[in-house]
Every structure is written in structure tokens, then in C-alpha cells.
Amino acid sequence: MDGECAQFPAVIDLNVGGRHLTTCLSTLTKYPDSMLAAMFSGRHPVAKDKDGRYFIDVDADVFVHVLNFLRFETVPPPGAAADVRKYADYFGLHVLKKGIINAHGMLEMLYDAWRRVFPDYTSHLEYVKGEVRKFNIFSRYFYLCILTARCSCRDCSPHEADFQGLPRIDIHLRLEDKRRSLLLSLLAHDLQCMDIFTNEKEITSDCYCIGAMKLRFGNAPKSTLNELK
């Protein structure tokens, strides 16, 4: 293996879907039967960006969990497990896949069933992720809001006071109260892959035309940490 990897430095600079990450060659080649080990074995050409970083065309928010597994053998949190499991299949990391199934198998099956309740769920999740990336780095908290298509209020401006001047991401949907609460909970769960957490319940406006949940960047609440034990 050493001779085959001679073209690669011990420390590898990566461009993962536009995000720059750095890791060790030994980390990427930890599991010899994986696609990553094959990519950095010296047997195959690996694309580089204009700055010489090795390019991997996947979502960096998910790939960081793959790297953390290779570094520390830690499985991702529940909210990231479904996406990371797909990457485990793609990169041939069977140990990672097994670890996710052992840690989160039944829970993720339940979340998958709930996601299927919403045909456009993936679009909603990607929209929210895109809006999150636009936030000022100093905005630690934000609200995720779902607004019903039919509002009994003529003027929704009084609702603004409920959100404490924090950034908001609005999704406009015609949903009954229970489905709206489920969608908020699913989105909050799946945003954990971006290091976003909540331990707060849904809040609603007096007329129930708005349902919202307050989320924060970093520092998983105790309720989430307990799920990971």
C-alpha cells in the first residue's frame, strides 16, 4: 500500500461539494475494501479543483460524519443517520452501515415512514438547508415556521412579536395541525446533520395559522444527547 500511495501526501486537502476539508491519508484508507481507500490508493486518478484539492462530489454536511467515523469510529446522530447510511453504501463502508443500523435502526425506520407522509419532504428539507446557509454566523437561534394557506387573520403582523426579532424560515403549506407538527419535528430531526438542535415544542399563533419551532446552532440539548447513548 505504501508504494501505491506514494503520490499522495500524508495530509490530504479535500474539496467536498465546494467545502474545504482536511484529513489524513491514513483516515481515508482505513478500510482497504472501501471506495475511499481505492480512490487514494494510487491506482486511480482523482480529480482536483483549481487549487489542487482532491474533489469529492457529495454533500459535505453528510460527508463530515463519514470522516468522523473513520477518525473516531463514532456513528452519526439520529438526524443524520439516514443520509450517512446512504453514503456508507456508496463508499462501501459496511462497518459504518452496520454501526448505524445497530444504533438507530428501528428509530430510522420510523422516521422514514413519517417522511413518506409528505411527498415533497426532500424538497422542503433542501430548501430549509439552503436558507440556513444564508444566515449570519452570529445568528445562533432561528425559527422554522409553517404557515397554512388559509389564515383566519386579516393581518398577520401581530405574529411578528412572537419571534423575538430572530431570523425565520417560512414554509407555506396547506396542512392540518397534526401534520404540521409532524413536519416541523421531522425537519428539526433531520437538521441535526448540520449541527442544529432543539429541545423546544411547537408554538402556534392564536389563530393557529402559524406553527413554529425555535432551533439553535451547536450544543445538542440533553434530550438529544440521551438519544445518542
Image (cartoon, rainbow, N blue to C red):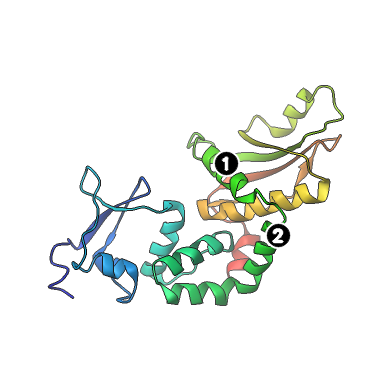
Picture layout, residue 1 above or below residue 178: below
| Location of residue 112 by image quarter | bottom right
Q: Are marks 2 and 1 in contact (CB under 8 Å)?
A: no
Q: Where 211 sits versus 42, above or below? A: above
Answer left or right for 74 relative to 196: left
Q: SS class of the residue under badge 1?
A: helix
Label 2 neighbourhood size at 10 Å, few (<14), some (14-19), many (20+)?
Answer: some
The quadrant of the picture occupied by the N terminus is bottom left
Q: Position of residue 120 (x, y in %)?
A: 65, 48
Residue 102 visible within the image: yes
Rendered location of residue 92, percent (x, y) = 39, 71
Q: Which mark is residue 114?
A: 2
- Which label is found at residue 84? none
Tell whether 214 sits left or right of 60.
Answer: right
Determine the CA span between mark 2 and mark 1.
Answer: 19 Å
Where is residue 191? Give x, y as percent. Answer: 57, 51
- Quadrant where the C terminus sits is bottom right
Which of the 4 quarters of the picture holds residue 153? top right
Amino acid of disc 1: Tyr
Foreground: 125 or 47? 47
Looking at the image, which residue is at 87% across and 30% down? 152
Amino acid on which disc 2 is placed: Trp
19 relative to 163, above or below: below
Toward the viewer: 209 or 38?
38
- Tell which of 137 and 130 is nearer to you: 130
Using the image, determine if residue 61 lies above or below residue 86. Answer: above
Residue at image point 41% right, 52% down: 60
